[in-house]
Amino acid sequence: MFLKKTNKPLHYEDRAKSAKPTMIILHYTGMQTMLAARERLTDPTSKVSAHYLVDTDGQVFDLVPEDKRAWHAGLSYWHGETDINSYSVGIEMVNPGHELGYKPFTSQQMQAVMDLCQGIQSRHKIEYVLGHSDIAPERKIDPGELFPWEWLAGHGVGLWPKPTDADLQKAEDISCNDYEVERLLTQFGYNPMGAYVDVVSAFHRHFAPEKFKTGEQEKVDMDTVVKLVSLVRQSGNKLVV
């Protein structure tokens, strides 16, 4: 991982009430090049910033100090918290995104993201590693269904479903009841006020990306429920409404 600092003026401020980071939020830039993304993230008129920018070759740009509040999350929510910027470290990854030719993230880029996240986890008590689409499912779809969340979780960054026999039994009891699924999504952390279909799609984008190949990303099935039950158990979250 090659870490570079930038001295350009950026949009950042103190975290609210001396908040400490408990989340890592991953984004894609949605721009064609690293230079274009860096210019936007360091443009005083853009009103957007992130702590880090990771290029496709694994180069990492250190843009905002981790103890400061960057402007990357926007209107968002996770497990009762709405000021996500104050409680997160934001990482932008160079990728054209869905509008400009979405493509897989490179191995060099992912190695750098893994190293970066592991470092952040060593410095802060990180509870959640999420995508922009998880915290803003009605507005955002990044980093998208091609992002290798399972691989990242295998290296100790973020959660991935690991169903137990008890999880399978609980999922069978719940079946695909929309009310119970919605409660589980809320318990895991998703916004209870979000449109159900958008939240389900966001969950699948993160934890069942294969559904996007078949066009079933809005459909809840037993695979959805089993994964959700497993994740709620692993997170230890209580229901917040």
Image: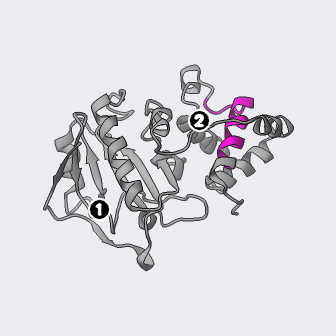
Q: In this view, does 114 lie to the left or right of 46?
A: right
Give the residue displayed 59% in from the left and 35% down from the top.
204
Q: Which residue is labeled 2 in the image?
A: 204
Q: SS for tag 1?
A: loop
Report the disc number at residue 220: none
Give the residue displayed 71% in from the left and 33% down from the top.
220
Q: SS for tag 2?
A: helix
Q: Is residue 29 left or right of residue 192?
A: left
Q: How many marks?
A: 2
Q: In the figure, 16 relative to 77: above or below?
A: below
Q: Which residue is labeled 1 in the image?
A: 47
**Secondary structure, magenta segment, majority class:** helix
Image coordinates of residue 225 in percent, x first then y, are 73, 37
Q: Dot 1: within a 10 Å radius of its alpha carbon, few (fewer than 14), some, or many (20 or more) residues?
A: some
Q: Quadrant of residue 1?
A: top left
Q: Dot 2: within a 10 Å radius of its alpha carbon, few (fewer than 14), some, or many (20 or more) residues?
A: many
Give the residue displayed 45% in from the left and 65% down from the top.
87
What is the three-letter code of the residue carrying label 1?
Lys
Give the residue displayed 20% in from the left and 57% down from the top.
42
Image coordinates of residue 68 in percent, x first then y, are 32, 69
Residues in magenta? 217-232
Distance Cα–Cα, label 1 vs label 2: 30 Å
Camera-nearest residue between 114 and 41: 114
Image coordinates of residue 230 in percent, x first then y, are 68, 41
What is the three-letter code of the residue carrying label 2?
His
